[in-house]
Image: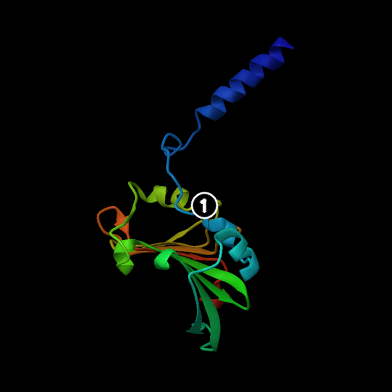
Amino acid sequence: MILTLVILVLLSACSSGNTSKNSNKSIEPIIDATQFSKINSAHLVEIMGEPEKIEDYEWSVPKTNKSIVGKLYIYEKNKFEFVLFDDIVTRLNVYSGQYWGYDDSTINFEEKDDIFPLFGIEHNNQIKKVEDTNYALRFSPVSDKIDDVWIQEIKDKTFGIAKFTYDSTYF
């Protein structure tokens, strides 16, 4: 009994010493991007409410050059833009106010590792950084629910656009 207690205490101490450098930070998520992975429009409206605007979205699929028409569901003056094909959310775009000019807000980060918690994402072990310039940062694959994360318009620890692709078939 005592030996079991000692082992449990040691295991607990070892696991608590194995924390990431971000575990002491408190990062308030902008939105939980994972929850929108491949949901239909009815579920999207349950989560986000009625959109401010729904627009047709004409798109040419890069891999096939096939022209398709989807829908854009727009929220909060275009802060959140959901791309739906066949009534399924395939991508979420998040824009800063400065990017679209609806206000002076920016999306800030201290380190590149902060980007995932900003959007409620826990990436898997297969994540790969596929682009890292002074202007853009891209990861693919990211998790079981998110194929691709693409951060653009990076400047002075802020960025203008975050794109979360749930189904790469269309992109």
Q: Where is residue 27 shown, x and y percent of the image?
A: 42, 43
Q: Quadrant of residue 103?
A: bottom left
Residue in the picture at 56% in, 74% down: 84
Left or right relative to 95: residue 120: right
The N terminus - image quarter: top right
Looking at the image, which is closer to me, 76 or 11? Answer: 76
In this view, which residue lies farthest toward the top?
Answer: 2
Q: For mark 1, give the secondary structure.
A: loop
Residue in the picture at 50% in, 28% down: 17
Residue in the picture at 40% in, 67% down: 77
In this view, which residue lies farthest toward the right?
Answer: 1
Q: Where is residue 28 shown, x and y percent of the image?
A: 44, 45
Q: Where is residue 41 shown, x and y percent of the image?
A: 61, 70
Left or right relative to 134: residue 3: right
Give above or below for 86 relative to 67.
above
Looking at the image, which is closer to me, 52 or 23? Answer: 52
Give above or below for 86 relative to 145.
below
Give above or below for 153 relative to 21.
below
Q: How is the image coloured?
A: rainbow
Residue in the picture at 32% in, 46% down: 110
Q: Is residue 23 visible?
A: yes
In this view, which residue lies farthest toward the left?
Answer: 156
Amino acid type indicated by mark 1: Ile
Circle 1: is it few (<14), some (14-19), or many (20+) Cα within 10 Å? many
Left or right relative to 70: residue 133: left
Q: How many marks?
A: 1
The residue identified by callout 1 is: 121
Looking at the image, which is closer to me, 125 or 106? Answer: 106
Left or right relative to 24: residue 136: left
Q: Where is residue 7 shown, x and y percent of the image?
A: 65, 19
